Image (cartoon, grey):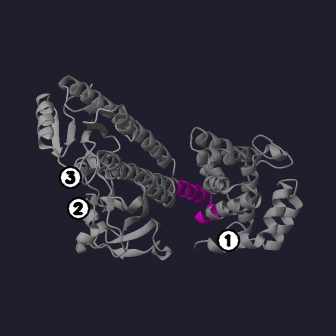
Amino acid sequence: MPTKKEKILIVDDELIIRELLFDLLTDEGFFVELASDGETALKIIRDDSEIAVLFTDIIMPKMDGIMLIHKARELNPGIVPIIMTGYATIETARAAVKEGAYDYVLKPFNISEIKTVVNNALERNRLIQENARLKEITELFKISENISAIRDEEQLFRFILNAALEHTQAKRGSILEVVEDGKYLKVVASTGLPSEMNGKTIPVDFKTISGMVVKNLEPLLIEDITQNPNLQNFLIGLKNKSFISVPLQRKKSEFMESHPLAINEQDVIAVLNVTDKSDGEVFSETDLKVLKIIANHGASAIENARLIHEIESAQREIVFTLGEIVETRSRETGSHVKRVAEYSKLLALKLGLSNKEAEILRLASPLHDVGKVGIPDAILNKPGPLTPSEFDVIKTHTTIGYDMLSKTKGVVLQSAAIIALEHHERFDGNGYPNGKKGKDIHIFGRIVGIADVFDALGVERVYKRAWTLDEIKEYFGEQRGKQFDPDLVDVFFSNIEEVLQIRERFPEKD
């Protein structure tokens, strides 16, 4: 039910009618505003979005009641119009309702009827507002859901801008990322700007709109930018009057507020700008509200994407560092695991695996020998030949590595577990630990098996010389279909030039 706090606007060119309805409705506890003509009424509606009910005479100078209803609805779609008329004809009433009036009352007024019509109109307004809020929540939920699924920053910025343009009916807009410790703004997404603006970086100028938003951490809603020459933003090159600029602001927890990092993180991630609203309309407070919500969701998504990227980068560093430690312990070098990783990715791509699968393999392969941490130094680094029992101990590094890695849930470490277990299996079934054969050996294991042996043969160690490329090719030719998958061997050596380029990029370190 209505709370009687809603606002009602009375529009009539007769003072006595305005005063009569004012007294009647204020006595009932309503907030009432008055206007003597349509133009004054529209200004009130434009300035006050909380007007719930519009009482208007149907016959007035300058603008009649029907025209006022149409224009009022453009400014406030939720406003409920009621026509007042002294023309007691059913045709007039029907025409008014057909043109958008919710109801009508006849002059002279019946007080009881006025109360009933007002309460019904307010109930109607409440339902309209609830439906609008529900629609807004649904739309914003979709935006939030879609934003949260995007991990690429460039795609995120583009999605945020498109959502802002769609929900404000704007034709032009941009997102300017704050870069270089807050000293510059970079155009990372735009619509309606010259193409050369994309990627452009400019110094932050606190006299421009975007600069003020960065400085003050507050959005700006400007109805007529031409009235203030200090707000001319030379980057945007505005010719339109109405403009909104909203910060995508970094969230700070209570802990971060009281324990700031030594690293300087700017409060504003980026600035979202929209202009050129459809049909030349002025942006409203509702538009600003929607943009603030989009900006909040967008800022959170960007921070999450950056955090995930940092975590993934840290994981990659940990994987490669651990792989290097393992190889160093067994008299290999850190460059070995990097080359094996790149060889493996190259071969995966040449075999037709997806970019994602190839990248997972690249990240997982450095841990192929991680199980060697469980092998005693006396055996792992024995200068002479191994006894059969010692070789049996060496072979356990595959199962040790698998047991270490298989308990994890991440796809990279799960893949690393498979590689650790199967990279010493042989295509002919004479490998270890499980004697798997042919295509029963996981493709990752077959690939890393080739990459690992190729690199080990081609580098010099204190206990052996580096093999020549011809010697390596001859060995792989002999082991084609025995130790190695013949199809993979063919693909690997048909791309040997790219393989050798990788070797040059990751040389042995002294």
Q: Secondary structure at mark 3?
A: helix
Q: Secondary structure at mark 2?
A: helix
Q: Is residue 95 visible?
A: yes
Residue 503, disc: 1
Q: Earlier in the sequence, mark 1 or mark 2?
A: 2
148, 434: nearer the viewer = 148
Instruction: Give x and y (percent) for residue 390.
Output: 71, 46
Indicate whether 132 appears above or below 224.
Answer: above
List the residue tagged with mark 3.
Answer: 40
Mark nearer the viewer, 2 or 3 = 3
Q: For the point 63% across and 61% down, which residue is it?
A: 337
Mark nearer the viewer, 1 or 2 = 2
132, 17: nearer the viewer = 17
Three-letter amino acid code at the position of disc 3? Thr
List the residue tagged with mark 2.
Answer: 216
Instruction: Give x and y (percent) for residue 137.
Output: 40, 39
Q: Secondary structure at mark 1?
A: helix
